[in-house]
Amino acid sequence: MKKITDGVYQDDDGAMHIHIEEMLDAAGYADTPENRETMMRAAIEGLRATWPHVAITVDEEPAITRVARFECPRCGYQCDAFGTTRGEAGAPEPGCVAGCMACGLPMVFDTDPLTGMLRLRTMTPADAENLSAGQVRELARIQQFAPTWTPTQRRRH
Ligand SMILES: [Zn+2]
């Protein structure tokens, strides 16, 4: 991992890793939940300003990766955080499947032919043919429960 600044590291895949404790320490702030929250938001905003599409992981939430902002093609829900079903770290790649945290729509990451950027699109029947049993289970769980989650719960999932 390459150190970018205090508390910010870049891994070999180019993804950024934020260590809040180190940032608080370097800035001389007390380690309180409020300061952690403020520092995390500021750090993510700061990184986004320079690297709009880089994947960002916070040390306390290793299973959640923040990517460029995406919008659900059905309900318009905007999100920039994705979690893996097995609780592992990792940024989404083209072909990865995801469920909308607001309406449950099954989606697939692919590459926008115009911009070359990662985007989300609605899952087609052909995509659904290739899902594993685990992916089907997880998407079913999201479809069932996502509409009942509160905004805070959505951020945590
Ligand atoms: Zn949606």
Image: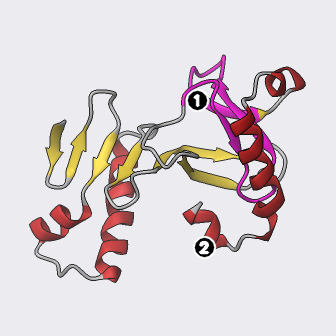
Question: Residue 80's x, y, as percent?
Answer: 55, 50
The tag on residue 135 is none
Residue 108 within the magenta-colored segment of the rendering = yes
On the image, which quarter does residue 54 sit in?
top left
Placement of 153 over or under 18, stated as above or below: below
Question: Residue 45's x, y, as percent?
Answer: 39, 56
Using the numbered discs, state the Cα–Cα distance from disc 2 to disc 1 in whole angstroms. Answer: 25 Å
Secondary structure beneath dot 2 equals: helix
Secondary structure beneath dot 1 equals: strand
Q: Nearer the viewer, residue 6 or 88?
A: 88
The residue sitting at 79% across, 70% down in the picture is: 148
What kind of residue is marked 2?
Answer: Thr
Q: Nearer the viewer, residue 86 or 24?
A: 86
Placement of 124 over or under 135, stated as above or below: above
Identify the residue under disc 1.
Answer: 118
2 or 1: tag closer to the N-terminus: 1
Identify the residue under disc 2.
Answer: 152
Q: Nearer the viewer, residue 43 or 13?
A: 13
The residue sitting at 72% across, 70% down in the picture is: 149
The residue sitting at 22% across, 43% down in the picture is: 9
Question: Residue 57's x, y, as percent?
Answer: 38, 49
- Residue segment shown in magenta: 93-121
| Residue with the most extreme right position | 125
Mark 2, Cα crowd under 10 Å, few <14 / some 14-19 / many 20+, is: few
